[in-house]
Image: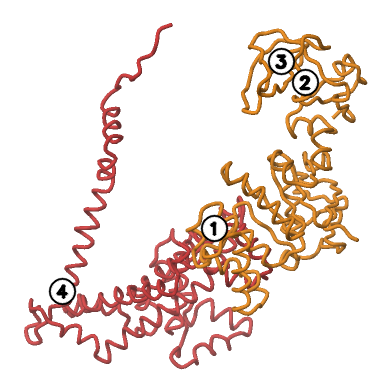
Chain colours: A orange, B red
Amino acid sequence: MAAAVEFRNVARHFGLVKAVDGVDLVIEEGSFFAMLGPSGSGKTTCLRLISGFESPTGGEIRIFGEDVSRVPPHLRNVNTVFQDYALFPHMSVRDNVAYGLMVKGEGKRQRLEKAEEMLELVKLSGFGSRKPSQLSGGQRQRVALARALVNRPRVLLLDEPLGALDLKLREAMQDELKALQMRLGLTFVFVTHDQHEALSMADSLAVFSEGRIAQIGTPAQVYDAPRSRFVADFVGSANVLPPDLTARLGGPARWSSLRPEQIRLSADGPLGGRVTALRYLGSGTRVAIQTEGTELAAFVPAGVPLPATGDQVRLSFAPEALNIMEGEG
Amino acid sequence: MSRAPAILPTRGAWDRLTGLFWRRPGVLLLLLIALPLLWLGVVYLGSLAALLLQSFYSIDEFSGMVKEEFTLSTYAELFRAQNVDIILRTLFMAAAVTLASAVIAFPIAYYAARHAQGAMKAVCYLGIMLPLWSSYLVKVYAWKLILAKEGILTWAAAGTGTSFVIDGILSVPGLSSSSLSTSPFGTWLVFVYVWLPYMILPMQAALERVPRSMIEASADLGANRGQTFRTVILPLALPGIIAGSIFTFSLTLGDYIIPQIIGNSANFIGMAVYKLQGTAGNIPLAAAFAVVPIIIMVIYLTIARKMGAFDAL
């Protein structure tokens, strides 16, 4: 069976700017896929390539096996939840949700019925006759979601879906989106710059850097074994060790990464250093340690005794915790 | 270490004034709007009230003096056949000018607002504004020459064998005349030319405010270009179109120079007001005529509002 979305060596250049350059990507049907990266890394352009708002300057994009490179957005059975929601301000919530059905020529009664069903699905029944301006940010997002889902798309695209919401709402919405995706069995593709969001929601994710995919895999794969310094640094702020330090700790002379929570402060250990800062995180404390020219972070769980700033400490970790990275990058 | 004081020393009158404005924001607001408010309230609304008052007076048939007695007889005079003619002619012209301006302005405004970038945007602004830099009279007389029987348009039509187009226009009942410059068609053309920038600019501003994501969302949901235009772009740009049409409509309703120079000298509201308050000395009837465009605009805006033209504001 064909994948939901497939990129084959896709490029999107704007003049000399290579927004997307040589991306190969397979998104399985029914998966919750995240495109993660800093701004300007090409993740949003990739999403727009799927929806059709950008055309590739090279390569091929397939949706369920069909080449869509020359298909305009309105003929793609793919819908988008926009970052700013892009609800039509002059229409009621109900008409917004029914819009896709209206332009496809569905009868008034039928489309309003389906719109009402969708509003129920996103827990907004009874809000149909309001204007978007009368809703809160979280409610607007639900309307945008209902407006996209009512068309029964094969793939749902979400552009920074939780970016504009406050923390509490964002966490609730994460669970809800995930539950919705499971229930509908749809392929969700979302773009985010927030690594926590990507790790907690996605089944698999691609980390973008400078128009290319730096790493692709399940959240655990990417988190536990970053392949490059960029990924190690961007996804979960791991410690990055230079080749000479890696070699001294028993590894090959290559760059490696070490997660803060895998480092223990102990009386004996292969590394020594001075505590320079403490950052309280609630579930524990992040301790910054200056050691042999490199600053390392260790995570001390709550309940374990803490050193004070300026203390000399020794660090230890399990040998297999040291993740050797590929290449120089 | 010496510590800086918690309150910095005042440096003079401006600092004290700024302090006053901070404590009482109303004072600054009052200072800023007092003068324009005085102008608007006394000079503008005052003269409008005087105008309205005059329109309820009448003129003595024998002495030609204004009788300062409250009466509706002047308004009744508006309903004489010749005056109704003037009002309907002006109304029809204003509507035709507005419609043509809107149709011509939309593509220009759309291009300038949504596609032109950088230098091209500046060229657009310049091209739209440039006609406003030269005198209105110069433009109207220039058009008179262009449209004249011996003018460049007739000459060019003869040279390219397209004289039948001009002849065709001039043979339409109601537009018939010896040349374009003396036909109502010429009046209409020059009105459209002269007021076009006032239609383009508000339209462009409205179109610029339509977020790109809104147009993309429409396409994303399956709408083709025509559907997106009808259901998203047009309703969202409608306040700008209405704003532009208020300009073209009311400017045409009040103008008395263009129909005097170009066209068949048929009376328009502006010309009637001009003649009545000047040579005829019938100020009450002139005032009553001047009230007509105000009433028409109020009716127009009420209909526009009812139809939801300002819902997207």
What's the residue at 76%, 18% (across, down)? A264
Q: Counting other residues with Cα less than 10 Å from the Cα at mark 1, is it few (<14), some (14-19), or many (20 or more)?
A: some
Query: Is label 1 in a helix, a strand or a loop?
Result: helix
Looking at the image, is B85 positioned above or below residue B246?
A: below
Three-letter code, disc 4: Gln
Please, which residue is most extreme toward the top here?
B1
Front tag of 3 and 4 = 3
Front tag of 3 and 2 = 2
Query: Is label 2 in a helix, a strand or a loop?
Result: loop
State which quadrant residue A286 falls in.
top right
Looking at the image, is B192 positioned above or below residue B85?
A: above
Q: Are marks 1 and 3 on the same chain?
A: no
B126 horizontally vs B71: left or right = right
User: Can you tell which mark lies on residue A65?
Assistant: none
Query: Which mark is first along the chain, 4 or 1?
Result: 4
Q: CA distance from mark 4 to mark 2?
A: 93 Å
Q: Which residue is mark 4?
A: B54
User: Can you tell which mark lies on residue B208?
Assistant: 1
Front tag of 1 and 4 = 1
Answer yes or no: do the residues labelled 1 and 4 have beta carbons within 8 Å?
A: no
Q: Are marks 3 and 2 on the same chain?
A: yes
What's the residue at 89%, 30% (across, down)? A326
